[in-house]
Amino acid sequence: MHSEELIDASDAELVVVALAGNTQAFDVLVNRYRRAMLAVAQQIVRNATDAEDVVQDAFLRAFEALPQLTDLNRFGAWLHSITRNRALRYYRNSSRYQPQEDMEPHLNRVSDTSAADPAHIVENELTQQAVRDAIQNLPADYQSVIELYYWAEMPQQRMAEFLSLPLTTVKWRLRKAKEMLKENLEKYGYGEDM
């Protein structure tokens, strides 16, 4: 398969090609699922750097165990399970576990803020923090679908496969999570103009 064909291939087709020795096929799978796996890992370990470590470990384990995958059409669900298990193991075994603020938004901020209104910058950061806090306060099932949908930008069908859930359940949880998120934000005065 050529690079263009790999991008449009199904997960099962990519697994077959990867098993035949084409590492580019596995790279496509990595790119397809990386953000979703980060969302799953970070939900458990609560630290972006540790989540990166978990995801790297999960991809390595998945690559090594790829020949053992029996249902090629369930690659996403299988990968979700590996990621979740690796994150839980990391969390349990990590003596250095300490929740930390994710510094990435601060690192990506434009360094010259002199032209920007300082009050607007503070208000924007407070709003972003309120949204992050509201998402963290959702039950885990709802938190997962919100993070996968918005942060990982995963289509609902792929979310269903990744989470091993029926599509209707994913749609229901996503709708309910949006409602709960809106209610939480409105309690703190953030919902009216969002």
Image: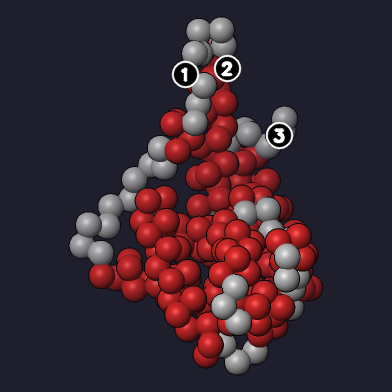
- Tell me the crowding category of disc 2: few under 14, some 14 to 19, or many 20 or more residues within 10 angstroms, Cα based: few
User: What element does badge 2 sit on?
Assistant: helix
Q: Nearer the viewer, residue 168 or 4?
A: 4
Q: Report the side of 89 relative to 111 (left or right).
A: left
| Residue at 56% across, 50% down | 135
Task: Give the residue pinned by disc 1.
Answer: 111
Which disc is residue 194 wearing?
3
**Marked residue nearer the N-terminal end (3 or 2):** 2
Front of the two marks 1 and 3? 1
Mark 1 / mark 2, whichever is N-terminal = 1
Helix, strand or loop at mark 3: loop
For label 1, the SS is loop
**Apparent side of residue 27 relative to residue 179 in the rendered image (left or right):** left
Q: Residue at x 50, y 8 (%)?
A: 114
Residue wearing tag 2: 120
Which amino acid type is marked by label 3? Met
Q: Residues within 10 Å of mark 3 (few under 14, many from 20)?
A: few
1 and 3 marks in contact (CB < 8 Å): no
| CB atoms of marks 3 and 2 within 8 Å | no
| Near-viewer residue (18 or 132) | 18
Q: CA distance from mark 3 to mark 2?
A: 15 Å
